[in-house]
């Protein structure tokens, strides 16, 4: 006869144990992904490259940011719309006028103009960019932050290996890897990590009493239901309790920063997210992903584009300066991505529609050779003419910069082999 726990599906088991934990301890910090009950593959690492980076700040522009209005302007063409091109700090290289601070830092950046993908659907495109695999119903693949923690472990044993700043809706998170490498979700960077304080009725003495009781319960539960899924949950919960007690928890609180610093980053979600990322990187968090929405500009694109791009421009430039001042930029990859591009043609609603044929990304820090443009699009920004770069190639490049084993096969609990970046080929030339 099968056990009661094994009869439950993954989501039901997750809800059962989450409810149990919240009832017993009065607090909850749980994995973001639905795929809670998974086993970890072996983490033996045969590095393919000299490790140059220890951290990643990955800025993901949800909604598909227009390449023509940012990093691949087309001045003089009808497809260029209202956006003008401006000269960067590197002679002969121009980008869109909405990114003046990044233009001034072009000597520290590499722009990939030849990104291309096969899907023009948001959810599927975002999933592919984050995992290197197409979305299918039978499995959920890990994102790069989970892979980094899986292979390299944590730098700070009391803080999560990775953090997601933003909505986190349908994010693949740790996929089929262990719950121990799940990212911590932060919905709003201004308020930090939620549910980290005990309720008023639960003082330290009662908290410890409940911990002892739950430990006794878990001991009997794990003896009765001996499997890696239950052990993984127990390990994750232990880490969550340790996080509640560490003084490094303050890293999640940007209110501790001086007003001048907060003002420099900008009083907006992307600026606050980058400030939070710096605080977390400074305390040893390996991977911070920051989401910014609002790029799905089907209507009246130029009503809001300049303001949103300006916030992004300021946030990245300030982050780079801050990390450099603290000696962390040489250890941190900064990556700017989005799920696909937008059409060269301005539609009847004064906006741009979905366009998977080509788009742009940016990468800086940690050994990246600056002042370079990779790839080329055609005259109007409709298709890639040279240097096709797919999402899995970008992820392979990130993994290469981190020194992760790109060619190593990792087996999911179902026995299927996968790689960190699928069949992606790293752009090794990006690294000086």
Image: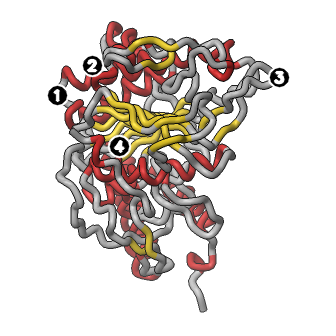
Numbered disc 1: secondary structure: loop
Residue 200 position, x and y percent, is 46, 34
Residue 297 position, x and y percent, is 69, 26
- Say which of marks 2 and 3 sits in front: 3
Q: Residues within 10 Å of mark 4 (few under 14, many from 20)?
A: many
Which quarter of the figure is the N terminus placed in?
Answer: bottom right
Horizontal arrangement in the rendering, residue 199 relative to residue 365 (left or right): right
Residue 375 position, x and y percent, is 44, 38
Query: Of 424 and 46, which appears nearest the observer?
Result: 424
Q: Tell me, yes or no, whether the two marked residues, 2 and 4, touch with CB atoms within 8 Å.
A: no
Looking at the picture, does residue 366 appear above or below residue 49? above
Q: Residue at x 22, y 66 (%)?
A: 46
Query: Of 219 and 213, which appears nearest the observer?
Result: 219
Mark closest to the chain's N terminus, 2 or 3: 2
* Label ID, residue 327: 1
Q: Quadrant of residue 244?
A: top left
* Label ID, residue 321: 2
Give the Cα separation between the discs numbered 1 and 2.
Answer: 10 Å
* Label ID, residue 287: 4
Give the Cα separation between the discs numbered 4 and 1.
Answer: 17 Å
Q: Residue at x 35, y 52 (%)?
A: 426
Residue 62 position, x and y percent, is 58, 35
Q: Residues within 10 Å of mark 2 (few under 14, many from 20)?
A: few
Numbered disc 3: secondary structure: loop
Q: Residue at x 68, y 32 (%)?
A: 343
**Residue picked out by circle 3:** 348
Mark closest to the chain's N terminus, 4 or 1: 4
Q: Tell me, yes or no, whether the two marked residues, 1 and 2, touch with CB atoms within 8 Å.
A: no
């Amino acid at each position: 006869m099968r056990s009661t726990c094994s009869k439950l599906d993954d989501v039901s088991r997750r809800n059962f144990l989450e409810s149990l934990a919240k009832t017993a301890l009065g607090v909850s910090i749980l994995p973001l992904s639905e795929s809670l009950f998974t086993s970890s593959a072996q983490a033996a690492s045969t590095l393919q490259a000299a490790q140059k980076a220890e951290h990643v700040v990955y800025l993901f522009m949800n909604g598909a940011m227009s390449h023509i209005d940012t990093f691949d302007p087309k001045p003089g063409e009808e497809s260029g719309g209202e956006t003008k091109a401006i000269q960067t700090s590197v002679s002969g290289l121009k980008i869109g006028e909405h990114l003046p601070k990044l233009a001034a830092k072009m000597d520290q950046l590499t722009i990939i103009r030849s990104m291309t993908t096969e899907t023009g659907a948001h959810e599927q495109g975002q999933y592919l960019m984050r995992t290197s695999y197409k979305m299918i119903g039978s499995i959920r693949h890990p994102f790069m932050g989970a892979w980094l923690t899986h292979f390299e472990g944590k730098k700070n044993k009391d803080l999560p290996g990775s953090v997601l700043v933003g909505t986190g809706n349908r994010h693949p998170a740790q996929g089929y890897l262990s719950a121990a490498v799940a990212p911590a979700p932060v919905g709003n960077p201004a308020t930090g990590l939620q549910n980290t304080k005990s309720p008023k009725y639960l003082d330290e003495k009662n908290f410890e009493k409940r911990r002892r009781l739950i430990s006794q319960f878990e001991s009997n539960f794990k003896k009765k239901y001996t499997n890696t899924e239950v052990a993984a949950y127990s390990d994750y919960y232990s880490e969550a309790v340790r996080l509640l007690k560490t003084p490094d928890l303050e890293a999640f609180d940007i209110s501790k920063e001086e007003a001048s610093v907060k003002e420099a980053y900008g009083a907006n979600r992307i600026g606050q997210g980058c400030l939070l990322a710096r605080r977390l990187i400074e305390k040893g968090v390996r991977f911070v992903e920051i989401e910014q929405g609002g790029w799905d500009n089907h209507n009246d694109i130029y009503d809001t584009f300049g303001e949103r791009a300006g916030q992004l421009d300021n946030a990245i430039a300030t982050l780079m300066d801050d990390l450099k001042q603290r000696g962390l930029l040489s250890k941190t990859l900064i990556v700017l991505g989005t799920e696909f591009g937008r059409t060269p043609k301005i539609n009847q609603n004064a906006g741009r529609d979905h366009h998977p044929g080509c788009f742009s990304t940016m990468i800086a820090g940690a050994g990246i050779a600056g002042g370079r443009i990779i790839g080329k699009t055609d005259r109007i920004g409709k298709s890639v003419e040279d240097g096709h770069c797919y999402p899995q190639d970008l992820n392979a490049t990130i993994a290469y910069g981190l020194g992760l084993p790109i060619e190593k096969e990792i087996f999911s609990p179902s026995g299927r082999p996968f790689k960190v970046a699928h069949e992606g080929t790293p752009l090794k030339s990006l690294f000086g």
